[in-house]
Amino acid sequence: MSNSNVAILAMLEAKPKKAQELEDFLKEALLLAEKEPDTCTWFALKLGPLSFGIFDTFKDDEGRQLHLNGPIAAALMANAEELLSVAPDIKQIEVLAAKVE
């Protein structure tokens, strides 16, 4: 994680018949995250049948803002109405402690 405490936690709730599409979208978004030099870690999460999340960390707040204005966020918002039952809950957070191998 390289000493980064700057993060985002995004909670996503899929429409009942769109869970697989949202899961596929999140898996494909990894390719975009890998191209972001200021994104230290990026995780797509499945929390339940319709509940998903994204957790990522950044070198600094500038990197976080670049990500929030980048291609993953743009693609998510472009597909939100079709895939999500409610608007994404996106929080800018701090990591207080982490174990990284």
Image (spheres, rainbow, N blue to C red):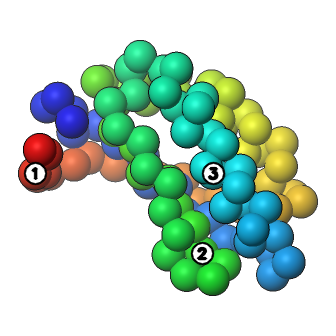
Q: In the rendered view, tell whether residue 65 sits above or below residue 83.
A: above
x, y percent for residue 59: 28, 24
User: Which quarter of the figure has residue 48?
Assistant: bottom right
Label for residue 51? Answer: 2
Q: Would you name the residue on which mark 1 appears? A: 99
Q: Are marks 1 and 2 in contact (CB under 8 Å)?
A: no
Which quarter of the figure is the C terminus placed in?
top left
Q: Earlier in the sequence, mark 1 or mark 2?
A: 2
**Residue 68 makes an appearance in the image:** no
Label 3 sits on what residue type?
A: Leu
Q: How many discs mark residues in the rendered view?
A: 3
**Residue 47 makes an appearance in the image:** yes
Q: Would you name the residue on which mark 3 appears? A: 26
Q: Please tell me whether mark 2 sits on a helix, a strand or a loop.
A: strand
Q: In the rendered view, tell whether residue 23 sits above or below residue 76.
A: below
Mark 3 is surrounded, within 10 Å at the Cα level, by few (under 14), some (14 to 19) or many (20 or more) other residues, namely many
Label 2 sits on what residue type?
A: Ser
Q: In the rendered view, tell whether residue 32 sits above or below residue 30.
A: above
Q: CA distance from mark 1 to mark 3?
A: 24 Å
Q: Please tell me whether mark 1 sits on a helix, a strand or a loop.
A: loop
x, y percent for residue 73: 65, 37
Mark 1 is surrounded, within 10 Å at the Cα level, by few (under 14), some (14 to 19) or many (20 or more) other residues, namely few
